[in-house]
Image: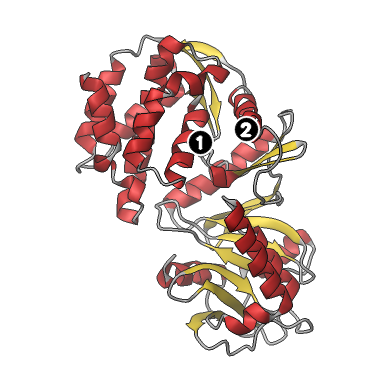
Amino acid sequence: MSTDALLEAARLIWPAPASVRVTGGGSTGGASRAAPVDADRTRSLVLLPSAANPKLAVPTHSRAAAAKVATSATAPGSLAASVRTRAMGLALGSGLGGRLLRDRLVVTLPPGATGLDDLLGELLHERVVVGLRVGPPRANRKPVLSVVTPDGRLVAYAKLGLNELTDRLVAAESAALTRLGAIDLGDVVVPEVLHAGRWQEHQLLVQSPLPVRRSKGAGVDLRLEAAMVVVSRAEGVTQAPLSAATWWTRTTRAADRLPEGESRSPLLAIGAALGEQADRVLPMGGWHGDWNPGNCSVVPGSVLVWDWERYETGVPLGFDGLHLRLQASIGAGATPRAAATALLADAAVLLAPFGVLPADADLVAQLYLWGLGVRYATDDQAKAGAAIGRLGEWLVPVLTTVKES
């Protein structure tokens, strides 16, 4: 996250006449056990790891709140990451981290000014402070707030749109969680919508917190697989030709609307080739839309899944299984091109639990990759700085090779 992105988010959370600035030197003196949350109408947040690369802003007025924000901002992807997260939480909880980490986001609210944290306190009937995570460069980057009480209880997460795309995604997640909350998903647990509305003309979603932790226990992969199958069938399964699928209609229209650029022509050509099989009957259901290792956690008795902003139905079954494999492979160090190539080779095995016939597996995997490419091009992930958005380096050559073989 850049400092500019941090300040953009902070100015939306604490709008004028409040002022926000980044300072060095830790002028607040670190977290204090006794300082009231807003005694002088200021907010001071430690920037981790620094102002030059602020990945997380942690409140300093309460050590307990600081520790909770640090340990609940994102799920550790490895044992080493889990150890680092726990160590940072301990350091902030002891006050040592606040003294060693010198860079701050400082918010000053003059009399009468309010921030989103004030609204969240009213909605939740709690006195709260917030931590802020904006995330790496992506078109769908948006502020995500950890909402905690001064004594360190995590009471909610809040998402706030920044623009047309992120407003649409926040609204879509609100709708998805409302629908899924009324369905028996077995051991799959999704957040509860606590509030859906607007703040500063942007979409706001406040949801119950799921414990963000590293997956553990026996059979993690099998339990994730079973959970994805449950989600794929949550709102029913139909057998239909590809041409009748709502996903196909939406994606082909999105491809047609792509602006001129290096990705448009190859994506249209790949889509046209796939369209030659539009009469193929496939099982259709739902998918989470972005099921990756950072959006789920397997714990005893439950599979916790969050970030439902891409959920949709009318999709060929098995997309979640393919997406999780692709994202996990890239996260483990594979290049996107190598990960996509391996995905196509393993498609039949990955899709079998969803009931996809081996004869259809290649087509479903190609449809998934093409649809992902159309999404990334529509969102202009490359312009936003996301490496995976550079489709000409991986997705286009992989699918073009398949189309020509």
Tag 1 and tag 2, C-beta contact below 8 Å: yes
In this figure, what is the number of numbered marks?
2
Q: Which residue is mark 2?
A: 224
Side of 61 relative to 363 (left or right): right
Give neighbour class at mark 2: few <14, some 14-19, many 20+ (Cα, 10 Å): many
Mark 1 and mark 2: Cα distance apart in space: 10 Å
User: For residue 216, what is the image quadrant?
Assistant: top right
Residue located at (40% from left, 15% from top): 242
Q: Position of residue 3 (x, y in %)?
A: 43, 72
Q: In the drawing, what numbered circle is on residue 324?
A: 1
Side of 318 relative to 236 (left or right): left
Q: Position of residue 293 (x, y in %)?
A: 55, 43
Residue located at (51% from left, 79% from top): 20
The answer to whether residue 26 is above or below residue 373 is below
Most foreground residue, 160 or 305: 305
Quadrant including the N terminus: bottom left
Q: Position of residue 229 (x, y in %)?
A: 61, 24
The answer to whether residue 199 is above or below residue 234 is below
Q: Earlier in the sequence, mark 1 or mark 2?
A: 2
- Label 2 sits on what residue type? Leu
Quadrant including the C terminus: top left
Side of 371 relative to 23 (left or right): left
Q: In the drawing, what numbered circle is on residue 228?
A: none
Most foreground residue, 277 or 201: 277
Q: Is residue 241 visible in the rendered structure shown here? A: no
Side of 330 relative to 392 (left or right): right
Where disc 1 sits, the SS reads: helix
Where disc 2 sits, the SS reads: helix
Q: Is residue 16 visible in the rendered structure shown here? A: yes
